[in-house]
Image: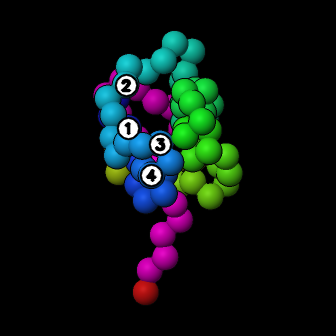
Amino acid sequence: MKVLYFAWLKEKTGTAQEELDLPDGVTDVAGLVTWLKGRGAGYDDAFADEAVVRVAVNQEHVDSDHKLTEADEVAFFPPVTGG
């Protein structure tokens, strides 16, 4: 799967994107976030306040219980305001 990080999530994780195999036991966005947080301090810091992190799967906003597949593109980003 392709995982994208935007804005301060990119800065804290130290990467804009990466290709990952769906980790064993991870079936949804919440599980992926938990797994990512275990990858190191930058990831843990990026997802410390999950309430402010938005997620899109295949360019559609989803909730944390959204099921994932190997073919998905997952994007994490901060809240966006418009005007």
Q: Which mark is residue 11?
A: 4
Q: Residues within 10 Å of mark 4 (few under 14, many from 20)?
A: some
Residue 20 x/y as whole percent: 37, 25
| Residue on which disc 3 sits | 13
Q: SS for tag 2?
A: loop
> Is residue 18 rendered to the left or right of residue 79?
left
- Which one is earlier in the sequence, the residue at label 1 or at label 3? 1
Q: Residues within 10 Å of mark 3 (few under 14, many from 20)?
A: many
Q: Residue at x 50, y 48 (%)?
A: 12
The reply to whether the magenta stretch includes residue 40 is: no
Pointer 2 with pointer 1, Cβ within 8 A = yes
Quarter of the image where the N terminus is located: top left
Q: Residues within 10 Å of mark 2 (few under 14, many from 20)?
A: few
Cα distance between the residues tagged 2 and 1:
7 Å
Cα distance between the residues tagged 4 and 3:
6 Å
Q: Amino acid at mark 4?
A: Glu
Q: Which mark is residue 3?
A: 1
Q: SS for tag 1?
A: strand
The reply to whether the magenta stretch includes residue 80 is: yes
Q: SS for tag 3?
A: helix
Q: Which mark is residue 20?
A: 2
Q: Is residue 56 among the parts visible in the rendering? A: no
Q: Residue furthest top?
A: 24
Cα distance between the residues tagged 4 and 2:
19 Å
Pointer 3 with pointer 2, Cβ within 8 A = no
Cα distance between the residues tagged 3 and 2:
14 Å
Q: Residue at x 55, y 40 (%)?
A: 42
Quarter of the image where the C terminus is located: bottom left
